[in-house]
Amino acid sequence: MEAPTDTIRLADLTTLRLGGPARRFVEAASADDVTAAVRAADAAGERLLVLGGGSNLVVADAGFDGTVVHVAGRGIERTDLDASRARVVIQAGEPWDEVVAWAVDESLGGIECLSGIPGSAGATPIQNVGAYGASVADVVSRVRALDRDSGAVVDLAPAECEFAYRSSRFKRTGRFVVLEVELLLDRGGRSAPIRYAELARRLGVAVGDRAPLAQVREAVLELRRGKGMVLDPADPDSVSAGSFFTNPILDPRAFERFEALVHERLGSDVQPPSWPEADGRTKTSAAWLIERAGFHKGHGAGRVGISSKHTLALVNRGGATTAELLTLADEIRGGVLDSFGIELHREPVLAG
Ligand SMILES: Cc1cc2nc3c(=O)[nH]c(=O)nc-3n(C[C@H](O)[C@H](O)[C@H](O)COP(=O)(O)OP(=O)(O)OC[C@H]3O[C@@H](n4cnc5c(N)ncnc54)[C@H](O)[C@@H]3O)c2cc1C
């Protein structure tokens, strides 16, 4: 269904509450509607913005000079494959956290650590959403998408999705529009092994243990609320796009240089956080870098700032513009580069 454009302000459809109008706006209530709207925009040579929950988007103040297709088709279908596994097919417009709540109610394990992540199910493969040691790539068994290059609807196996840390083939190219996501979940009624120490402590279990699904969901939601990472109209720190920067992953020589710089600047007893990656590189903490470069929780005196609960979240404190937000992001990025020679990468997608 096409809406009169002057009524659609993208600020009303993004969690940052930023962004000007859409030139054309199509509400697509089913996978067929999405397919038709995207094919029509592509045939007309229009710029296209696929919109889910708007929770990982920074839209320009001038708005989007093209067609915005809002993916809104709902539906979840469960098929039990055997005593231990169920296949779950989710329409792209289904709100992700409702999917997680449903899975926990159905005693299906595998996505409980991804509780409280805003946005649509269809967007979860885009940046391979992750939290508390889990990511959606752990359970995705197929992604159905419209391939804008060929115009055909295709089924992609996990390897074809090229999932990586906060990234995938979908995020790197605008070629695919996700129509549905298929997950393989565990019917055992317990969580996947808990990999994140802070969560394991909260649950009173050892890292690697499993726990009852509902308890894991509650513990994750509680931890996230403490960081302003659950959308809540009463929490001004949740007017964000979640983490604004990803954790840098450094090759061995870059990590050595970084460590040497840390010792020189902060003292030889200071060790930067580090987690080994499977490919021999090392991940470090963007929040640690930002803090050590002098940007603390609550930073910023104006209408944009750093969340008072989470160093990685940039928030619109009310009435801000996208230009102000991006200036703050540049200031932080520049500060970290000057202090530690590391370039931070933005997690949300810019549009317009
Ligand atoms: C408070 C808060 C906490 C967050 N916590 C986390 C977290 O813990 N972990 C995490 O990984 N992320 C987190 N995020 C980021 C965000 O919630 C996720 O990235 C989410 O998956 C985005 O979904 P969306 O539907 O809102 O996508 P949108 O913001 O609408 O879109 C994001 C990008 O995906 C594209 N896209 C959306 N739907 C489709 C589709 N069907 N097909 C093709 N492309 C599509 C858009 O074009 C855009 O490029 C958080 C955000 C907020 C505001």
Image: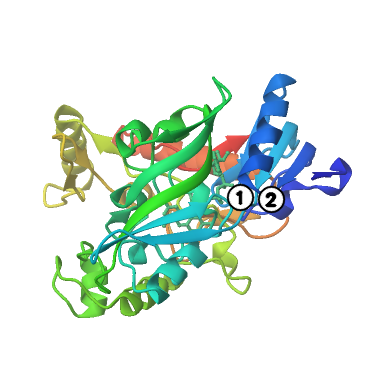
Q: Is residue 341 left or right of residue 323?
A: left
| Mark 1 vs mark 2: in front | 2
**Picture disc at residue 54:** 1
Task: Determine if residue 130 is in view.
Answer: yes
In x, y percent, where is residue 11?
72, 50
Q: Nearer the viewer, residue 49 or 179?
A: 179
Q: Amino acid at mark 1?
A: Gly
In x, y percent, where is residue 132?
30, 61
Q: Is residue 123 left or right of residue 323?
A: left
Residue at position x 40%, y 68% in the image: 103
Residue at position x 34%, y 46% in the image: 141
Q: Amino acid at mark 2?
A: Ala
Asked if the beta carbon under badge 1 is closer than 8 A to the nearest atom of ligand 1, the reply is yes
* Callout 2: SS: loop
**Picture disc at residue 29:** 2
In x, y percent, where is residue 8?
80, 47
> Is 316 situated above or below 44?
below
Q: Is residue 77 left or right of residue 137?
A: right
Report how far apart the C-alphas of labels 1 and 2 lie in the structure.
16 Å
Q: Residues within 10 Å of mark 1 (few under 14, many from 20)?
A: many
Mark 1 or mark 2: name the one nearer the start of the chain: 2
Asked if the beta carbon under badge 2 is closer than 8 A to the nearest atom of ligand 1, the reply is no
Residue at position x 54%, y 20% in the image: 149
**Picture disc at residue 207:** none
* Callout 1: SS: loop
Residue at position x 54%, y 54% in the image: 120
